[in-house]
Image (cartoon, rainbow, N blue to C red):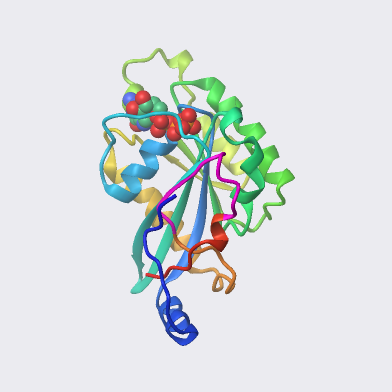
Amino acid sequence: MESSLEFSGSLGSVSSLASRCRTFKVLVIGDSGVGKTCLTHRLCAGEFPSRMEATIGVDFRERLLDVDGEKIKLQLWDTAGQERFRKSMVQHYYRNVHAVLFVYDLSCPSSFSGLTSWLEECRQNSVRQEIPRFLVGNKTDLRESRRSDGLVSQERALDFARTHHMTFFETSAKSSPNAVEDVVAAIGAKLKGQKKPSVSSPPAYSGSFKLSNQKNPEKDVLSCC
Ligand SMILES: Nc1nc2c(ncn2[C@@H]2O[C@H](COP(=O)(O)OP(=O)(O)OP(=O)(O)O)[C@@H](O)[C@H]2O)c(=O)[nH]1
């Protein structure tokens, strides 16, 4: 696992840096293949990756945001959609989470039906109702080329979002960077209004945390903006 920044210094320096930039942990979940990695890559690197492999465990990416003059850092936890690549790690994903992004593929209705299991996983891991939730229907670029009965309609998704108190977006990690930026802005705006993450909130990472690495990444590195 890599870390983006390592900090060794006095506690005073840490707290002054931390007060300048709050870090929020944003968990990205959804079925395998819906585009979680591509979306988080687009959010953090501003581009659509040319080659993708299934995520194993979790990948970390970061995005700095300026929300009304305040700098905040989103630490995106891009988790594996495949059960076999995530099972023993799940409780780590949910610890100290500040927001959850539920992703489905709007050209794959089974990934939308699968959202109920992701909600259930959140419930089992005690994600509180106040934690902001975002519903993202990805791959809008495929809408034109598919028959409408093979698509998840906006009405159906909106209804689901209302029922589960989620903010709803449709995006294409591939071809609509503006829609992806709207998601980032909405997350930033929601989180900025929250009180400061506790001192023990997770540090920032970029890299991977695979199933073979059973250490708690939150203990490994302390980093600030
Ligand atoms: N057309 C289209 N394809 C996309 C889009 N986003 C992702 N893909 C493709 O969908 C496939 C899966 O993307 P990933 O980002 O790896 O999906 P994932 O949800 O991270 O999958 P897991 O790591 O297995 O959980 C890849 O072939 C991507 O190129 C999109 O917006 N439009």
Q: Residue shown at 43%/55% (left/top)?
A: 186
**Quadrant position of ligand 1:** top left
Viewer-side residue, 58 vs 134: 58
Q: Can the viewer see residue 139?
A: no
**Relative to 43, 168 lies left or right:** right
Q: Residue shown at 40%/12% (left/top)?
A: 147
206 drawn magenta = yes
Q: Residue shown at 54%/63% (left/top)?
A: 202
Residue 214: percent from left, percent from top? 60, 47
Viewer-side residue, 215 vs 202: 215
**Relative to 125, 161 lies left or right:** left
Viewer-side residue, 218 vs 131: 218
**Dominant secondary structure of the residues highlighted in magenta in the image:** loop
Looking at the rendering, in which quadrant would you find the C terminus?
A: bottom left
Residue span colored magenta: 205-216
The quarter of the displayed image where residue 163 is located: top right
Residue 82: percent from left, percent from top? 55, 28
Q: Residue shown at 50%/28% (left/top)?
A: 32
For the image shown, how many numbered marks are present on the structure?
A: 0
Residue 209: percent from left, percent from top? 50, 46
**Relative to 52, 60 lies left or right:** right
Q: Can the viewer see residue 61?
A: yes
136 drawn magenta = no
